């Protein structure tokens, strides 16, 4: 049985008026893998019968599931700007002769670093989400039960 996915309108500002927020409702422990299978942003709601801190797990899942990677994108762009500044200082005479090419190379390095940073941040969030799902399954004792069933 897969998790129930529902959509509702988000009560937000005018420009977000048409935005739809998807809600991923997990009612059974066996549905936890659906959090990893579902692509795109969604709000995870746990409705498990187990005696666990469901609010804390929901916060963890929602934080990692909806991570955009911007924090790493900003770190990567900051590092690239520092490197570009150092290279510009060291190669100033050459840059004076090739101003347009130097600007284009610097812009290309900045855009590439942002893309790499965001991709790294999303990859890391996905790994943390997978780890959190596995930790909750272990806490619920699901991993052993599923492994024993498949054997």
Image (cartoon, grey):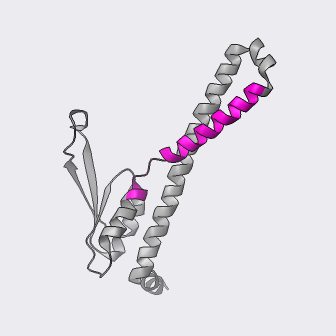
User: Is residue 1 in sight in this rendering?
Assistant: no
- Residue 100 picture location, percent across and down: 67, 14
Of residues 11 and 130, the one nearer the viewer is 11
Q: What residue sits 25% from the left and 45% below the top?
A: 20
- As rendered, which of 137 and 99 lies closer to the eye? 99
Q: Quadrant of residue 15?
A: top left
Furthest toward the top, the residue is 97
Q: Is residue 131 magenta?
A: no
Query: Can the viewer see residue 143?
Result: yes
The structure residue drawn at horizontal position 35% and vertical position 69%, both measured from the top left corner, is 56
Left or right, residue 48 beside residue 144 = left
Report the span colored magenta: 63-89
The image quadrant where one finds the N terminus is bottom left
Residue 87 position in % (x across, y down): 75, 30
Image quarter of residue 47: bottom left
Residue 59 location (% of width, % of height): 35, 63
Main secondary structure along the magenta-highlighted residues: helix
Q: Is residue 90 above or below residue 97?
A: below
Q: Nearer the viewer, residue 134 or 95?
A: 95
Q: How many labels sit on residues? A: 0
Q: Is residue 50 left or right of residue 88?
A: left
Residue located 70% across and 20% down the image: 102
Residue 148 image offset from top left, x and y in percent: 46, 87
């Amino acid at each position: 049985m897969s998790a129930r996915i529902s959509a509702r309108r988000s009560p937000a500002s005018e420009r977000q008026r048409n935005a739809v927020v998807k809600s991923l409702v997990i009612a059974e422990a066996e549905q936890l893998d659906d959090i990893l299978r579902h692509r795109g942003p969604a709000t995870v709601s746990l409705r498990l019968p187990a005696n666990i801190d469901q609010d804390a797990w929901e916060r963890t899942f929602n934080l990692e599931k909806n991570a955009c990677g911007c924090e790493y994108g900003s770190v990567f762009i900051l590092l690239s700007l520092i490197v570009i500044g150092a290279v510009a200082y060291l190669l100033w005479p050459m840059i004076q002769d090739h101003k347009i090419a130097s600007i284009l190379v610097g812009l290309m390095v900045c855009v590439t670093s942002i893309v790499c940073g965001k991709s790294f941040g999303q990859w890391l969030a996905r790994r943390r989400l997978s780890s959190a799902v596995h930790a909750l399954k272990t806490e619920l004792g699901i991993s052993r039960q599923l492994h024993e069933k498949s054997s």
